[in-house]
Image (spheres, rainbow, N blue to C red):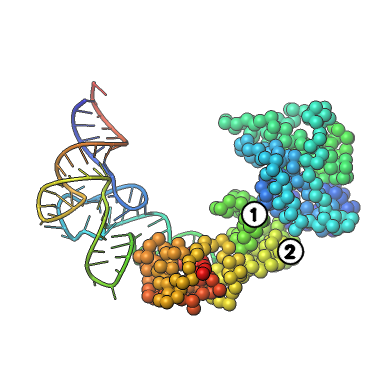
RNA sequence: GGGGGGUUACCCGAGCGGUCAAAGGGGACGGACUGUAAAUCCGUUGGCAUCGCCUUCGCAGGUUCGAAUCCUGCACCCCCCA
């Protein structure tokens, strides 16, 4: 057994545990079963899920047997932890789609075919669905003192809010998650639950329940919340969450997020989110201190995560897009490559005939592409040296675009200023 | 019910008969600098057009050679007195 516990500690991934010394020895002395839960709140995982998922992965690579538990049942209720207001309930169909989407992505991180330490993918709806309300109250609810529940931060916080309170439904969430732990222990010999630091209350609820119901000791470990040095949660962008689904967040956008991480945060992200060896991380941190402008840590972080989430081809396309976005001449590329690189960029279609005869005046092209609101503004941009065709500056107002200017079969790439791009697609 | 003030371009705000497409600031956009950061600096900022034309200052009319600026009516907003 690798010293996974020591590694987690070095990487700053241990926020709180129920029994520090025990866990350290226990994990060294055998292949253990552990789990983390993921509620299907969307059809894709996002960066917020990365930490527990990657931690499960670290355990598996160290020889343990992780369970990724998808909350088909708990997702119907909504976890009140860390939430300031009552949630909207998702429909059964939504949940089903979400579960499928999340399961597909989890396969990138965990190995479900690894023989004796294969990961398991379970859905708590499978054992909750047929559990009747009365049976649940008698078997599980009986072992839940209300006083204890009321004392949990997640509940107290909500009750203390002026506008607040919470519904009985959300109040019951904790019971479901607690029972999951007991069930997994009973049927899969699972003794450890991990999760974000906001899960502490739910995890300890499960541990208490197991002791009362079955008299067995269980253990918990939480990871810190991944936040930036200025306190903002990692993975939030102006456009919302940073998704792991390439359809929602392109590999390029994903890569860019990490390459733009602040110097102060880069080292911590490398430790917490990548599997780069400690010596290498320390070397990178040294570089970062000496030559911050090289931003080696950020580059490595972006590479590692993009490869992990989007695969080698996703990384390649993100890097190709990065080169293009930061000035490389655009030539010898196919329609497919261009469209992939500029996936996040608005594109407009024009008839191919516009390129023939006299050609398309550059100011008109800028307007058609949405880069200028009027021809006057377009002319101004050109005059000020801010107009680029396929990344080459064009300063002549009289420029007319012709077939010659196509970067690929049907596409001309226009740019205004440093980074406002737009595509024109010429179709017959 | 009586009296006073206001309505200007994306926003705030000057202008009170011609030299006003309309000061200034913010924002936005370009450029320089730079580490794809922050800050800073410079430029541009109604439309069309090869220095000329067109449309704009709450809305509708009017006076004048000429109006954002004066007059009349209308709409909306604010303040004071009852």
Q: CA distance from mark 2 to mark 1?
A: 22 Å
| B13 sits to left or right of A126 | left
Residue extending farthest to the front is A428
* Element type where label 1 sits in the image: loop
SS under mark 2: loop
Pointer 2 chain: A
Residue indicated by mark 1: A243
Query: Which circle's residue, 2 or 1, is located before the other in the chain?
Result: 1
Q: Nearer the viewer, residue A189 or A366?
A: A366
What residue did someone put label 2 on?
Answer: A276
Residue under the point 69% across and 47% down: A98
| Residue A212 placement: quadrant | top right
Quarter in which the N terminus of chain A is drawn = bottom right
x then y, percent, for residue B43: 34, 66
The vertical placement of A195 against A321, above or below, is above
Residue B52, image x, y percentages: 22, 67
Looking at the picture, how far across and down is residue A349, in whole percent?
A: 50, 64
Tell me: A203 left or right of B74: right
Residue at 82% in and 45% down: A192
| Tags 2 and 1 on a common chain | yes
Mark 2 vs mark 1, foreground winner is 1
Which residue does the image show at 71% across and 56% down from the upper left? A272
């Amino acid at each position: 057994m690798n010293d996974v516990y020591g590694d987690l500690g070095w990487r700053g991934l241990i926020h709180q545990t129920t029994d520090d010394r025990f866990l350290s020895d226990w994990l060294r002395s055998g292949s253990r079963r552990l789990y983390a839960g993921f509620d299907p709140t969307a059809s894709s995982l996002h960066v917020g899920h990365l930490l527990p998922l990657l931690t499960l992965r670290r355990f598996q690579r160290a020889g343990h047997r992780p369970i990724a538990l998808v909350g088909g049942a708990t997702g119907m209720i909504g976890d009140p932890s860390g939430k300031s207001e009552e949630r909207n309930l998702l429909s059964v169909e939504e949940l089903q789609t979400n579960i499928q989407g999340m399961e597909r992505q989890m396969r990138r991180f965990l190995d479900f075919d690894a023989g004796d330490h294969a990961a398991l993918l379970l859905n708590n709806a499978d054992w909750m669905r047929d559990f009747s309300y009365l049976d649940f109250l008698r078997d599980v609810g009986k072992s839940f003192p209300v006083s204890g529940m009321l004392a949990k931060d997640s509940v107290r916080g909500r009750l203390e809010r002026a506008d607040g309170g919470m519904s009985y439904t959300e109040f019951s969430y904790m019971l479901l998650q607690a029972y999951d732990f007991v069930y997994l222990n009973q049927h899969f010999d699972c003794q450890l639950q991990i999760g974000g630091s906001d899960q502490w209350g739910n995890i300890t609820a499960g541990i208490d329940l197991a002791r009362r119901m079955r008299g067995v000791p269980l253990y918990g470990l939480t990871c810190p919340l991944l936040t930036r040095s200025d306190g903002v949660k990692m993975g939030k962008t102006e456009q919302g969450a940073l998704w792991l689904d390439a359809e929602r967040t392109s590999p390029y956008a994903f890569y860019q997020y990490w390459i733009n991480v602040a110097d102060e945060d880069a080292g911590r992200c490398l430790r917490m989110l990548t599997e780069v060896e400690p010596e290498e991380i320390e070397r990178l941190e040294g570089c970062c201190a000496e030559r911050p402008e090289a931003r080696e840590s950020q580059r490595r972080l972006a590479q590692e995560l993009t490869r992990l989430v989007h695969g080698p081809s996703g990384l390649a396309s993100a890097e190709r897009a990065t080169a293009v976005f930061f000035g490389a001449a655009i030539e010898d590329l196919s329609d497919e490559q261009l469209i992939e690189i500029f996936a996040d960029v608005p594109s407009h279609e024009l008839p191919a005939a516009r390129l023939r005869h006299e050609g398309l005046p550059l100011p008109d092209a800028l307007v058609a592409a949405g880069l200028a609101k009027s021809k006057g503004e377009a002319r101004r941009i050109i005059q000020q040296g801010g107009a680029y065709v396929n990344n080459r500056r064009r300063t002549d107002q009289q420029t007319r675009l012709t077939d010659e200017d196509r970067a690929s079969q049907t596409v001309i790439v226009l740019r205004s200023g440093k980074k406002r791009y737009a595509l024109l697609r010429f179709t017959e």
